Image: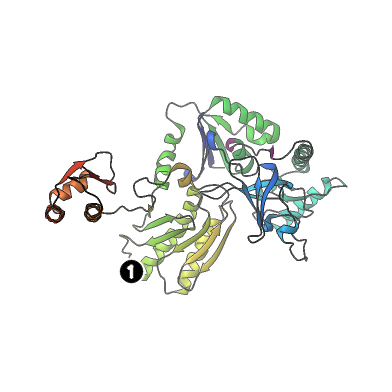
Amino acid sequence: MNNEILVNITPQETRVAILEQGVTQELHIERTSGRGIVGNIYNGRVSRVLPGMQSAFVDIGLDRAAFLHVADIRDSGQEGDAAKPIEKLLYEGNSILVQVIKDAIGTKGARLSTQISLAGRLLVFLPQESHIGISQRIEDDSERELLREKLQHILPADEKGGYIIRTMAETANESDLRADLEYLHRLWRDIQQQSITIAAPVLLYQDLDLSHRVLRDFVDENTARIFVDSRENYQKLVRFAQNYMTFIAERITLYTGDRPLFDLHGVEEEIEKSLAKRVNLKSGGYLIIDQTEALTTMDVNTGGFIGVRNFDDTIFKTNLEAAQVIARQLRLRNLGGIIIIDFIDMDSEEHKNAVLAEFNKALLKDRTRITVNGFSALGLVEMTRKRTRESLAHVLCETCPTCQGRGEIRTAQTICYEILRELLREARQFEANEFRILASQQVIDLFLDEESQSLAQLGDFIAKPISLQVEESYTQEQYDVILM
């Protein structure tokens, strides 16, 4: 037990850092003003059905309608049957019980499912299913069978729901499983009752806040301490643990030191690093990480690493290190969706297989569902990582107002030439005694130096004086041409 969880709470936000062997592996941030809604259950109302997209928009009481695809509708097709089209399942004005499976991200609304799941510490209850599944992280076959038997032994005779046995149930006894089972049953009965008595759209169940979800979803036998720096929330978490997971309560510790909790453990520095495009490798190589709306790309480079024997060894060692670092960065930055990794080209199939094996091994620590397709014909590793919440960068950052997210701005020289074209255009269309250029210091300096002759020639051509004025508030790309 040498892993730690740090919980930093202020009135504005809750931040959680997961430390393994003293190294920050995951960061989670929840703003009080913008709490995520994944896991919430609503009685929604269908506002629009789109047969062409086989989807519907559902009003769940938020500013933006949520999105429901036919594949996420429980009755769209029973096993072995052809899927029914969405227009046969829903109509506008329909009341429908839905659960949020993905937060609104960017311009996309929240994504919904009618396949409800309720998570406890040991079990996930699937009211509309009938099977018992077991976490793939529990690898021992005898342990899997024993857990299945324990659960089946305590299930009511009239049980209609299905279950997933979570990793944390690996050492649980029947008493622990029964407590979780009864809690989930009570919760589901309450949700059903509300759905009958309260008109749509309405929130029926709100998932736990971040600090409580951490206890439910992240604490395991390897967690030595959970440090909390808020006395009020420390007491709440201890009470929650005493009621639902008694063995955890004694691990929760109130942090009262003078130095901020995240500073003490170097987490603030890790947050800063996680927002940079470049990640340095110990070997001297580096990664370049680019996030776009469509996908995330990761490019591996040798940088200053020259190796010890030959270039192939240099490439292989850099790629091996990069495989481990990439697995960590996926968790740290909470990157999801389609991810393309451009490892340095390797000729040896043995080296490729070794890098892929190292990467898959490093990914085993990740709780999020991941699919790795291996090397493509172009030498790229294609993978997907389930995205339910926004990445760390999207939570903490916004689009740059200067470059509008391009990551580049036009040069001062480019802006000078744009201004000259605009001046000529204005002079041909309008009568003016004088033209005044309002621009940034960099652009005005260029007009006074390298481009002074160009400006003078244009002034002679239009036969009008041209004056210059620096606007301190303008970015390099901003300018105005004023007719005097």
Vertical relation: 269 (above or below) 428 = above
Q: Position of residue 25 (x, y in %)?
A: 49, 47
Q: Position of residue 114 (x, y in %)?
A: 71, 50
Residue 119 visible somewhere in the drawing: no
Characterize the local packing of mark 1: few (<14), some (14-19) or many (20 or more) Cα atoms within 10 angstroms.
few
In this rendered view, identify the residue nearer to me: 88 or 385: 88
Vertical relation: 54 (above or below) 440 = below
The answer to whether residue 43 is magenta is: no
What residue would you read off at disc 1? 309
For numbered disc 1, what is the local secondary structure? loop
Q: Position of residue 160 (x, y in %)?
A: 83, 49
Locate residue 405 relative to residue 331 in the image: left or right. left
In this rendered view, identify the residue nearer to me: 391 or 438: 438
Q: Position of residue 404 (x, y in %)?
A: 38, 49
- The quadrant of the picture occupied by the N terminus is top right
Q: Quadrant of residue 43?
A: top right
Q: Quadrant of residue 254?
A: top right
Under mark 1, the amino acid is: Arg
Q: Quadrant of residue 417?
A: bottom left
Specify how the rendered protein is coloured.
rainbow
- The quadrant of the picture occupied by the C terminus is top left
In this rendered view, identify the residue nearer to me: 84 or 14: 84
What's drawn in magenta, residue-wise?
Answer: 201-211
